[in-house]
Image (cartoon, helix red, strand yellow):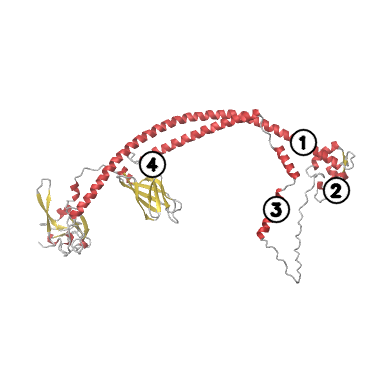
């Protein structure tokens, strides 16, 4: 039998322990042995044609799908099956057959190239079994931790439900208390309001009386001042001496204008003066009150040049900087500003004292204090109710989350896990958000807020999706996919950015560990041929 038609003769131990021989063409997996029967014509696996069996592995491609040349490089689309007894069987492209490079660990791909290949399947199988054993131990320990997490989640859920019920009962009591405090407050505020109004009214009346008295005094003083000849009446000519009363703003108070202000009379006595006082009091300026002179700008004295003796040098002027001169000018200006005329200051202070409301009497102040206490008590009860509402809202929010089939992910809630790289610190807060912060200063960037579980149909709890993060410059909003794998510890193991603004995190947790099936370690030897 030629090398291209070589049939592999393999010993396979079945459950009865009896060795049997399985023959098939080179490069054919055991699962397809039934299609290659030596004494029958071969039909291409795509059904395109049937050829004599001696044309299988004859180094000429007859089938479009390359199935007639599983053990040669004749077909460009063919594949060669590496049995790799003791390790993992695999397929390689037919083009790699006899190319001088050992691709199959059992060396079967280089049967006619002269390449010196060493069968490494046994060693690779041993190493893989060690890795699988370690993974099995991690899975086993992780699953035990997962059971603890589930029990803790159950207890925590019951505690939160109990706490929620208790808080909701307390809320009813607080609501009743708030309404009671509201009634007390409103009851206390009514007499307070009435007492304040009485006080304000009395104050306004007092101010009106004071203003009226001052106005009468000012009117009497004005009458005496206008009555230049002290004959007990004010005449038109006497009124004309006060040009500030000019009605047409031409700077002169004419006789006609003065008579108009006096109601058409030539002169008025004290009693009649009361009726015209309202016409002139706003403009009237008492002679006893000096008019503030308008500021007069004094010209700077011209600088006098020093007289210099022809036989002697002039003394040098002192070097005074512009800044020092400005500071001196500013100081002088501020001192002048601070010094207001005593008469004006005392007048303003007196006016403020008169306008200031007097303190409440003892009875009114007592009502105000009682109402204020009622308000404070009401606000305190309202604050307590708001805090209770916040507690209820937070607990209900937590209880509403999908923490897995057995609530095994509950322990991650309100927790955050960080991974530090050479440039950034990545922070994952499950069921909340993912962020990135420069390691050596800078603002934090939101890489996405909690969206949903996004794993495959058979287990959606293997992938978390965080969306609607900070927008990229002229790009989409950032988002993060978090892939969960079994581990004894809860930790972020890696981060990457496979696509612009789309991040990937690897995250280990016991919560995804599954119960390990009881499997014989020798089963990982991959004895299927």
Left-right relation of 99 to 396: left
* Distance (Cα) linking label 3 and label 2: 43 Å
The residue at 9%/48% (across/down) is: 18
444 up-or-down from 388: above or below: below
Within-10-Å neighbours for mark 2: few <14, some 14–19, many 20+: many
Question: Mark 1: few, some, or many residues within 10 Å (few <14, many ≥20)?
Answer: few
Q: Position of residue 333 (x, y in %)?
A: 70, 53
**Which numbered disc, 1 or 2, marks the residue closer to the eye?**
1
For residue 295, say whether it is visible. yes
Instruction: Say which mark, if any, is on residue 254.
Output: 2
**In which quadrant of the rendered image does the N terminus lie?**
bottom left
Helix, strand, or loop for circle 1? helix
| Whole-number angstrom distance, CA of label 4 to CA of label 2 | 91 Å
Residue corresponding to mark 1: 212
* N-term mark: 4 or 2: 2
Q: Which residue is mark 4?
A: 413
| Residue occupying the point 69% across, 62% down | 318
* Nearer the observer, 425 or 26: 425
Determine the CA span between mark 1 and mark 4: 74 Å
- Work out whether mark 1 precedes mark 3 in sequence or the reverse, and give the earlier one: 1
**Farthest residue toward the front?**
311
- The nearer-to-camera label among 1 and 3 is 3
- Looking at the rendered image, the disc whose residue lies closer to the viewer, 4 or 3, is 3
- The mark nearer the N terminus, 3 or 2, is 2
Tell which residue pokes out farthest to the bottom in this image: 311
Up-down relation of residue 116 to residue 225 (above or below): below
**Alpha carbon distance from label 4 to label 3:** 67 Å
Q: Position of residue 24 (x, y in %)?
A: 13, 56
Q: Position of residue 35 (x, y in %)?
A: 15, 54
Which residue position is annotated with label 3? 333
Numbered circles on residues, count: 4
Q: Secondary structure at mark 2?
A: loop
């Amino acid at each position: 039998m030629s090398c291209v038609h070589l049939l592999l003769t393999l010993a396979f131990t079945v459950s009865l322990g009896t060795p049997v021989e399985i023959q098939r063409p080179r490069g054919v997996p055991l699962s397809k042995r039934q299609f290659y029967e030596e004494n029958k014509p071969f039909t291409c696996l795509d059904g395109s044609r049937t050829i004599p069996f001696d044309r299988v592995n004859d180094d000429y491609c007859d089938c479009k799908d390359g199935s007639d040349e599983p053990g040669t490089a004749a077909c460009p689309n063919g594949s060669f099956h590496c049995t790799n007894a003791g390790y993992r069987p695999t397929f390689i492209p037919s083009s790699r057959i006899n190319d001088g490079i050992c691709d199959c660990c059992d060396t079967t791909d280089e049967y006619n190239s002269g390449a010196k290949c060493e069968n490494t399947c046994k060693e690779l199988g041993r190493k893989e079994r060690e890795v699988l054993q370690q993974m099995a131990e991690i899975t086993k320990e992780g699953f035990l931790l997962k059971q603890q997490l589930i029990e803790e989640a159950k207890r925590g859920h019951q505690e939160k439900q109990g706490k929620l019920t208790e808080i909701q009962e307390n809320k009813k009591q607080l609501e009743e208390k708030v309404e009671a405090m509201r009634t007390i407050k409103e009851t206390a505020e009514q007499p307070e309001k009435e007492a304040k109004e009485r006080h304000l009214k009395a104050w306004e009346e007092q101010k009106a009386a004071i203003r009226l008295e001052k106005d009468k005094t000012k009117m009497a003083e004005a009458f005496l001042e206008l009555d230049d000849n002290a004959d007990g009446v004010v005449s038109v000519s006497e009124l004309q001496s006060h040009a500030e009363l000019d009605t047409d703003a031409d700077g002169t108070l004419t006789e006609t204008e003065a008579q108009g202000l006096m109601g058409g009379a030539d002169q008025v006595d004290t009693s009649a003066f009361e009726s015209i006082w309202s016409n002139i009091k706003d403009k009237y300026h008492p002679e006893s009150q000096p008019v503030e002179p308008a500021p007069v700008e004094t010209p700077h004295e011209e600088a006098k040049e020093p007289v210099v003796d022809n036989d002697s040098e002039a003394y040098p002027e002192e070097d005074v900087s512009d800044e020092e001169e400005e500071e001196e000018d500013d100081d002088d200006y501020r001192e002048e500003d601070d010094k207001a005329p005593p008469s004006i200051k005392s007048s303003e202070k007196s006016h403020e004292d008169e306008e200031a409301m007097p303190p409440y009497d003892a009875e009114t102040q007592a009502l105000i204090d009682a109402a204020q206490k009622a308000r404070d008590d009401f606000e305190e009860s309202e604050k307590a109710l708001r805090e209770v509402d916040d507690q209820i809202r937070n607990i209900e929010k937590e209880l509403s989350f999908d923490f897995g089939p057995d609530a095994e992910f509950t322990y991650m809630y309100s927790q955050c896990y960080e991974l530090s790289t050479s440039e950034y610190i990545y922070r994952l807060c499950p069921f909340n958000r993912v962020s990135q912060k420069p390691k050596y200063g800078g603002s934090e960037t939101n890489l996405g807020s909690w969206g949903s579980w996004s794993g495959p149909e058979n287990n959606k709890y293997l992938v978390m999706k965080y969306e609607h993060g900070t927008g990229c410059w002229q790009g989409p909003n950032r988002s993060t996919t978090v892939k969960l794998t079994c581990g004894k510890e809860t930790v972020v193991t890696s981060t990457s950015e496979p696509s612009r603004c789309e991040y990937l995190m690897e995250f280990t947790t016991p919560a995804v560990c599954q119960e390990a099936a009881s499997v014989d370690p020798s089963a990982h030897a991959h004895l299927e041929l």
